[in-house]
Each structure stands twice: as structure tokens, then as C-alpha cells.
Amino acid sequence: MSLVCAISNEVPEHPCVSPVSNQVFERRLIEKYIAENGADPINGQPLSEEQLIDIKVSHPIRPKPPSATSIPAILKSLQDEWDAVMLHSFTLRQQLQTTRQELSHALYQHDAACRVIARLTKEVTAAREALATLKPQAGLVAPQAVPASQPAAVGAGGEPMEVSEQVGMTPEIIQKVRRGKTVPEELVRAEDLSKYRQVASHAGLHSASVPGILALDLCPSDTNKVLTGGADKNVVVFDRRDEQIVATLKGHTKKVTSVIYHPSQSVVFSASPDSTIRVWSISAGNCVQVVRAHEAGVTGLSLHATGDYLLSSSEDQYWAFSDVQTGRVLTKVTDETAGCALTCAQFHPDGLIFGTGTADSQIKIWDLKERTNVANFPGHSGPVTAIAFSENGYYLATGAQDSSLKLWDLRKLKNFKTITLDNNYEVKSLVFDQSGTYLAVGGSDIRVYICKQWSEVLNFTDHTGLVTGVAFGEHAQFLSSTGMDRSLKFYSL
């Protein structure tokens, strides 16, 4: 067995051990480093020469002592220069690594700040437009409301002040001004949500010979339209109001594990372990595009906010960004340092970043434009099974096979809440409602938490099998779920 110096990566003539880092060094190199820095070169903790522990090794051939001849003197000079180069090179490597980490964090903070500025600019523009709409109305109504015997109120600039109490405010104007600021008035309150019960159950959507509904989504523009994917390889569109199947879409060669309803078009998307993503036309009842972005099963699917692009993750360790209209794969990226399968994927509401879950319990945040991994969230102890971003973009909810639910603050890049579930609880689905007020969890049962307090407001155990999907209706007026018992259930007052 040979010892190697941690600084020069060479076999030392006089080896010694640092008790601070437990690393082996050439004594003359470590003594020089200590004289200059007073710390251990590996972890930076304080270290003195007296703390060094010599290692006794046998030297069959002892080096000759330096003599007064010129050649040994030259060799000694060269050795000293080599030692100095090695020490300098080691220091530079450490500084480079530290600088890279700081730069990566600074770039992400800058990008996040740009997004916040863009959102605030948009809100200011909307407020100015609303104000411009209100001013003409104020100019028409206010003069009629001021009696002739009373002088008009005068502002600091000498101009008449508008009396806001006398201005007509239509509900449309109020909604426009308040949009994005407060929770919608139509949103179901927590005390009413806690009174929900099962109001409908449908078990005939998918084949009974291969039981199980594996995926669920609602149409964003009409949440009465329900989309499911089953173990029978079929995609089904169901109308909740009419209680009828609108379309049954066949084409996958394996079970359907992910489905998405387009927000504005009569189009749906599905993914399967058969390595394909399919784009379906509901009106025509057929497949219009087959996206072949992966070499292994597709594990996650998410639609971009524009409705034009799809994000997908796969067991082949890649995530892909594809064009919906052409079916072309625009980019495909893997984390070479990880080397493990991706288990789920979800776009952030702003569409510029997204998250993926991995089989080795990591949550990774990616920058879509740069195609780089900008942040990692370790903490789970099992494969990540579901992730969901809140509508305001501040929070990320994640579930894994460790029977826990974790909440992350994307502004501070840290875990601020961990909800420990029952033993062996399997989280299969996570979803925030459209206002970001409630978070639904589907797995061994159905649970709904109210955000900010993160307290449980209801729990359903009606499914006889594992719950694979949960979704909120508009303004949380109802809750839907699917399970391995082949049933689609609805809960409401």
C-alpha cells in the first residue's frame, strides 16, 4: 500500500497525517501551507505544525543528503519551486469551485428578480388601464352629484377633486382591478369544503378486464369535462354534467400514466410507458401527433403556459421539450452527474423554469432557456412520485415514497414545512386549486390542506384501491378523484 499526498498527489518522502481532515500530506508541503494560511488545506479548519502526526514507513533507499555541490543545490531549488506550484494550483482549484457555486446561485437570484420585476410591471400596466377606464366615468357622474349651492372640493393643485364615493363601480371593473390580488369570492370556504361528501361515482369508463385509472385532468376552461388515462391503454373524455363518455381514444400499446387537457382547444395529450406521447383531437376522435422524444417509458408530462409546448420526463434519464403542432422534439437534456431515472415533471406557472423528480429522491429545478439545472432540493428518502407548483409560483409541493409531503419556498430555496403522513402512505398525485388556496393529495386516501396554515380540512377514504389522481373543479366547487378501483368519483356539498 502506498500513501499519496493530498496536495501534490505524489508519494511523500516524509508522510504525516492531519487530525483535522484525516488526510495524508508531504510534511514540507503542509508545513509551508500552514505557515501561510494557518489552516488545513482540505476543510479550512485551524491547524498547527504541532498537531501533525508523522507516519513511520520503511525506506529501502534513503535519499542522499544535500551537499555543497551545485547539482543538489539546483535540484533543491527546482523542488522548492515545484512545491510552490503545487500549493498554488491546489488553492486555485478550491477558489474556482467556490466561485462556480456562488455564480450559479447569483444567476438564479438574478433570473428570479427579473421575473418578479416583469410580473410587477404587468400588474402596474393593468392597474393604469383600469384607472384610465374609471376616470371618464368619474368625469361624467361626479358633476351631477355635486349640488349647485356647494363649492366643489379643490385639490392642492387648484383643480377640482373627483369624489370617488359618487363614481359608479361596476362588478366587471372591480374584478379587473382586484384580479390576482385577492382570492375569488366564488371560492368555496374552508368550513364549507370540510362538509364535502361523495355525490357521484362512475366505474364504467375503462375496461374491467384490466382495472385501474392511472391519470386524471380537468379542462381548465370547463372543469365539467374530465380526462382520464387507464391501465387498459385508453384515454377517455367524460362529461360530468351529462354523465356521458364524450370520446374513447385508443392507440397506446401500454397503460396510460399521464394525461393533460388543452386549456383552449379540443385537444388532449397522453403519455405511456410505451415511450410515446400522443396528441388527440376530441372532435375527430383520433391521434393527430405522436411525439417520440424518449427511448424508455414516459413518466411525467406538463403543458407550457402558452399551450404550444410539452415537457416530458422519462426513465431514460432525459427530459424533453417538444412542439405540440409539429410533434418535433426541440431539445432533450439529461443530468450526467445524476445517472438515474426521472419520475415526474411539472412547469412553473411562469413557464421559464420547471421541476423534475428523480428515482434517487432529488427534486431538480431547471432553467428552460439555458437548459441548466439551477437548484436542487434534497430531503426525501425515497423516489419522488409527484410535484406541484402553487399558482402564485412561490411554493412547490413534493411527495415521495417516504410517506411524507414537503413544501418548499422557491424564493428562499428551502424546505419550510414537512407533513408526515401515515406509515406506508403512497403519494401518487398533488394539485393546487386554481387560486392556490388549497392543496389536494391523492394516494392511500384523499386529503385536502389549506395553504399557509397547512392544516387538513378533509379526508376521504371512499376508494377501495390506491388513489392515482385528484383535481379541483372551478373555484373548488367540487373535487374529483380516480383510483386503481377503476372508479371516477366526485365530491361536493
Image (tube, rainbow, N blue to C red):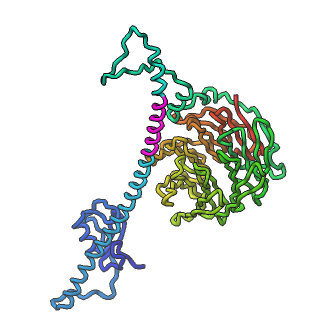
Dominant secondary structure (helix, strand or loop) of the stretch shown in magenta: helix
Outermost residue to the left: 68
Q: Residue 361: x and y, percent?
A: 56, 55
Query: From what the image shows, is residue 130 above or below residue 88?
Result: above
Query: From what the image shows, is residue 127 above or below residue 29?
Result: above
Quarter of the image where one finds residue 286: bottom right
Outermost residue to the top: 149
Give the residue drawn at x 83%, y 49%: 208
Q: Residue 478: x and y, percent?
A: 68, 34
Q: Residue 268: x and y, percent?
A: 70, 50
Residue 132 in the magenta stretch? The answer is yes
The answer, for residue 465, to whether it is visible in the render is yes
The answer, for residue 401, to whether it is visible in the render is no
Please state which of residues 321 and 444 is positioned toward the viewer in this rendering.
Answer: 321
Residue 440 in the magenta stretch? The answer is no
Query: From what the image shows, is residue 59 above or below residue 35?
Result: below
Please state which of residues 117 and 48 is positioned toward the viewer in this rendering.
Answer: 117
Please state which of residues 85 and 271 is positioned toward the viewer in this rendering.
Answer: 271
Quarter of the image with the N terminus is bottom left
Quarter of the image where one finds residue 75: bottom left
Give the residue drawn at x 44%, y 21%: 164
> Viewed as shown, does residue 122 lie left or right of 61?
right
Give the residue drawn at x 81%, y 52%: 210
Outermost residue to the right: 209
Which segment did they paint magenta? Answer: 117-133
Q: Residue 438: x and y, percent?
A: 58, 36
Give the residue drawn at x 66%, y 66%: 295
**Numbered-mark total:** 0
Quarter of the image with the C terminus is top right
> Viewed as shown, does residue 241 lie left or right of 15?
right
